[in-house]
Image (cartoon, rainbow, N blue to C red):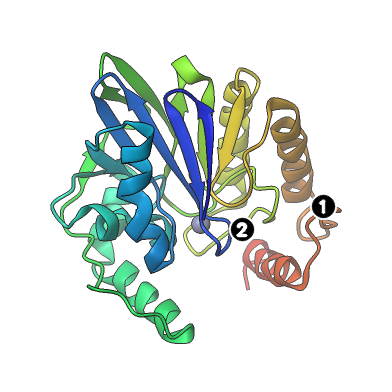
């Protein structure tokens, strides 16, 4: 797991798998952990990462309901509060146990062992757009759907950091999952654009932290890609076999098959 500091109040940890990011944000005496790394050893050291930074844990946030972003409770205990967008709370309530099942499948594939199974359990539904209070300040929450049917992006204004969820990735093309849609995805990118323009750092759900210019370039590529579907060319830096497979699913999704 790689850990980088973006600001005295913001640290990002990136998982070895899919470069899944976990953003740790502090204000005053409060600290939230947004999304999660994936491997058991990475989750195990996460509390020590906070301790090392001098942050004391308050609660968890998740940008959306995909299982690989929901593992914070494995690091901080099943009693930890987990705040999600109302859309994500509705999705998790509609598919109880789904995240735990998908985690089990992943663990089985890689022969991974964990001390306990994932229990997403109780979540706190946050109004989005809206604010999440932290210390004496707020994290601004914006709707971010289209990749999935649910989700939010988090704007940490005082640090000029945008936590984008599964958008603006330098390693993954836009993925329209079941429940997602091209139109919603494009609308999310348009909403995020205004925040990207003010950001010093953009944290994608997967991949390295971006500066403003690079995030803006990826945003333009992703808009062009989505608008051109089903005939879209893949962005030049994202043409691996895995990205081509995601592309084939996107094509099927927009073609309605
Ligand atoms: Zn993801």
Q: Residue at x 33, y 19 (%)?
A: 138
Q: Which image quarter: residue 142?
A: top left
Q: Which residue is mark 1?
A: 235
Q: Which image quarter: residue 105?
A: bottom left
Is disc 1's CB within 8 Å of ligand 1? no
- Residue 186 lies, with reference to residue 44, above or below; the image says above
The answer to which of 84 and 53 lies nearer the viewer is: 53
Q: Left or right of 198: which side holds 127? A: left
Is disc 2's CB within 8 Å of ligand 1? no
Q: Residue at x 58, y 52 (%)?
A: 206
Total label count? 2
Q: Which residue is mark 2?
A: 175
Helix or strand or loop: what does disc 1 sit on? loop
Q: Quadrant of the C terminus?
A: bottom right
Measure the alpha-carbon separation of dots 1 and 2.
13 Å
Q: Residue at x 30, y 75 (%)?
A: 114
Q: Which image quarter: residue 127?
A: top left
- Residue 117's x, y, as percent? 24, 73
**Callout 2: few (<14), some (14-19), or many (20+) C-alpha neighbours within 10 Å?**
many
Q: Is residue 146 visible?
A: yes
**Callout 1: few (<14), some (14-19), or many (20+) C-alpha neighbours within 10 Å?**
some
Q: Is residue 70 visible?
A: no
- Residue 199 lies, with reference to residue 184, above or below; the image says above
- Residue 106's x, y, as percent? 44, 77
Q: Which mark is residue 116?
A: none
């Amino acid at each position: 797991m790689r850990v980088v500091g973006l600001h005295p109040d913001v640290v990002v940890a990136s998982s070895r798998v899919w470069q899944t990011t976990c953003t740790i944000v502090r204000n005053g005496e409060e600290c939230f952990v947004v999304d999660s790394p994936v491997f058991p050893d990475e989750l195990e050291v996460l509390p020590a990462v906070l301790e090392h930074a001098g942050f004391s844990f308050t609660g968890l946030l998740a940008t959306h309901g995909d299982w690989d972003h929901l593992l914070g409770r494995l690091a901080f205990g099943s009693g930890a509060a987990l705040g999600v967008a109302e859309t994500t709370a509705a999705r998790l309530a509609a598919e109880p146990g789904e995240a735990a099942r998908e985690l089990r499948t992943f663990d089985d594939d890689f022969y991974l062992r964990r001390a306990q199974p994932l229990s997403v359990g109780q979540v706190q539904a946050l109004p989005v757009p809206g604010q999440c209070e932290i210390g004496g300040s707020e994290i601004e929450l914006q709707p971010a759907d289209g990749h999935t049917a649910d989700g939010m992006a988090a704007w940490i204004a005082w640090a000029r950091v945008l936590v984008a969820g599964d958008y603006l990735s330098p390693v993954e093309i836009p993925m329209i999952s079941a429940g997602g849609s091209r139109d919603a995805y494009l609308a999310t990118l348009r909403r995020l654009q205004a925040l990207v323009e003010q950001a010093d750092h953009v944290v994608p759900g997967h991949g390295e932290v971006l500066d403003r210019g690079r995030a803006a370039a990826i945003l333009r590529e992703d808009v062009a890609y989505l608008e051109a579907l089903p005939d879209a060319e893949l962005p030049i830096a994202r043409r691996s076999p895995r990205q081509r497979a995601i592309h084939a699913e996107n094509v099927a999704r927009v073609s309605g098959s």
